[in-house]
C-alpha cells in the first residue's frame, strides 16, 4: 500500500511493541516520541490522513486540530467529545 502508521507517545508501552512484533508490523508502524512542534507539524502536513481513535483525549483531540491546521483529513473516534 505504500503507507506507514506513525504513532506518537506509544513507544514506551511494552504491549504495543509486543503486538507490532507478533503481527510483523515493525516495518509498517513507526513509534516516535519527543518530536518538536515543527517536526510534529511536518508529520501532519506530509500525512495522507490523521487518525484519533483514542478515548484518552480529555477535550477536542489535538490530532484533529493539528491535522486541520495543515489541511490533512482526519478520522476521529465516535465519542461525545468529537461529536
Image: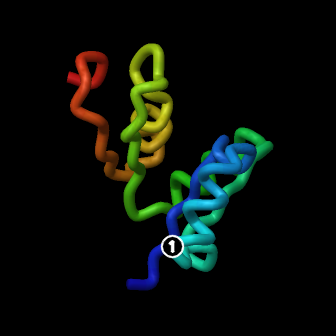
The N terminus, quarter of image: bottom left
Q: Residue at x 45, y 84 (%)?
A: 2
Label 1: which residue? 23
Residue positioned 38% across, 57% down in the render: 49
Count of number-bearing discs:
1
For the C terminus, the quadrant is top left
- Residue drawn at (66%, 58%) of the image: 17
Asked if residue 66 is positioned above or below residue 33 in the image, the reply reads above
- The quarter of the displayed image where residue 25 is located: bottom right
Residue 41 in the image, given as x and y percentages of width and height: 61, 47
Left or right for 12, reference 27: right
Residue 52 vertical position relative to residue 7 in the rendered view, above or below:
above
Position of 80 with respect to 16 (left or right) is left
- The 10 Å Cα crowd at callout 1, few under 14, some 14 to 19, many 20 or more, is few
Q: Is residue 21 left or right of residue 51?
A: right
- Secondary element under disc 1, as helix, strand or loop, is loop
Amino acid at each position: 500500500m505504500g503507507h506507514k502508521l506513525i504513532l506518537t507517545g506509544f513507544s514506551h508501552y511494552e504491549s504495543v511493541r509486543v503486538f507490532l512484533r507478533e503481527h510483523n508490523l515493525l516495518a509498517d508502524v513507526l513509534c516516535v516520541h519527543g518530536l518538536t512542534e515543527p517536526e510534529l507539524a511536518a508529520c501532519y502536513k506530509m500525512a495522507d490522513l490523521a487518525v484519533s481513535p483514542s478515548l484518552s483525549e480529555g477535550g477536542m483531540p489535538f490530532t484533529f486540530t493539528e491535522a486541520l491546521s495543515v489541511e490533512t483529513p482526519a478520522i476521529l473516534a465516535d465519542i461525545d467529545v468529537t461529536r
